[in-house]
Amino acid sequence: MSKIIIAIDGPAAAGKGTLARKLAAHYDFAYLDTGSLYRAVALTLILSGKPDPSESEAEDAANNLNPAILTDSELRAEATGKLASRVATMQKVRDALKIFQIDFANNPPEGQQGAVLDGRDIGTVICPDAPCKIYVTATDQVRAKRRWMELSARGDERPFNDILQDLIARDRQDQQRAAAPLKPAKDAYRLDTSDLSPEAVLKKAIEIVDSRIK
Ligand code: DC
């Protein structure tokens, strides 16, 4: 039987990860944070002394990922996210990570009935036939504040304005790249989370998913 796929896309710090994780728990589906794959490629390169990789070096890292890197505390660091956005512009890196993502969606690891994937191109490229697609957004200010709080909690104190400018630059890079640019799928529900609590976002998302899978 084919699996139910929920595709969550949107710009950085819009609340995709929190929502996707909660949706997966609600429906007892598998969850994949696809951004962590691009971050894993970036961190592998940083740790192997290649902070400015060529496309073939990045492709090589993507083809030989060590799963242990996914639990490294530096995965969520700002420098890792920045390089992740850059390697994500490389078609060969995207190709190297694509099959794993499609396979995860269609064959959830613990045999669940469905999967929730969050990223930038899930509804447009990885799972274009997913019945439920949500494009999560929030204003630049709100997203920068969320990222600032996340980084502060990690002990990474940076001026708010630096974070805001980095976020805007990262969105621009993610949206303007030729390979699988960040954009809402035509059939995605656009959910602006700027003025919503995480609970309200989850409630709305469950309504959307229920209306599309029942
Ligand atoms: O969601 P995140 O901040 O962890 O993602 C890091 C970078 O990875 C992001 O700037 C762009 C890239 N990415 C992507 O291109 N496609 C995805 N499906 C997920 C992430």
Image (cartoon, rainbow, N blue to C red):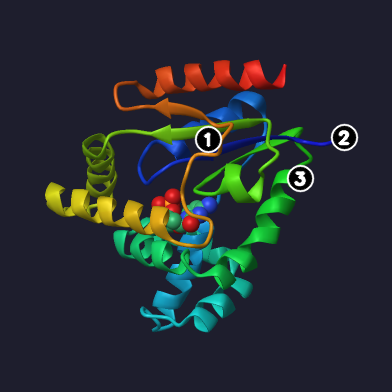
Q: What residue is shown at x 60% (from left), y 24% (from top)?
A: 26
Q: Are marks 3 and 2 in contact (CB under 8 Å)?
A: no
Q: Earlier in the sequence, mark 2 or mark 1?
A: 2
Q: Residues within 10 Å of mark 2 (few under 14, many from 20)?
A: few
Closer to us: 40 or 52 = 52
Residue 30 pos. (x, y %): 66, 39
Looking at the image, the residue that sits furthest to the right is: 1
Q: Earlier in the sequence, mark 3 or mark 2?
A: 2
Kind of element beneath mark 2: loop
- Mark 3 → mark 2, Cα distance in angstroms: 10 Å
- Mark 2 → mark 1, Cα distance in angstroms: 23 Å
- The kind of residue on which mark 2 rests is Met
Kind of element beneath mark 1: helix
Residue 146 pos. (x, y %): 27, 39
> Residue 122, which numbered label?
none
- The kind of residue on which mark 3 rests is Asn
Q: Which residue is mark 3?
A: 106
Q: What residue is shown at x 48% (from left), y 22% (from top)?
A: 202
Kind of element beneath mark 3: helix
Q: Which residue is mark 2?
A: 1
Left or right placement of residue 48 versus residue 208 in this view: left
Closer to us: 163 or 138 = 138
- Mark 1 → mark 3, Cα distance in angstroms: 17 Å
Q: Earlier in the sequence, mark 1 or mark 3?
A: 1
- The kind of residue on which mark 1 rests is Ala
Q: Which residue is mark 1?
A: 20
Left or right placement of residue 21 versus residue 131 in this view: left
Residue 150 pos. (x, y %): 29, 44
Q: Quadrant of residue 14?
A: top left
Q: Are marks 1 and 3 in contact (CB under 8 Å)?
A: no
Q: The N terminus lies in which quarter of the figure?
A: top right
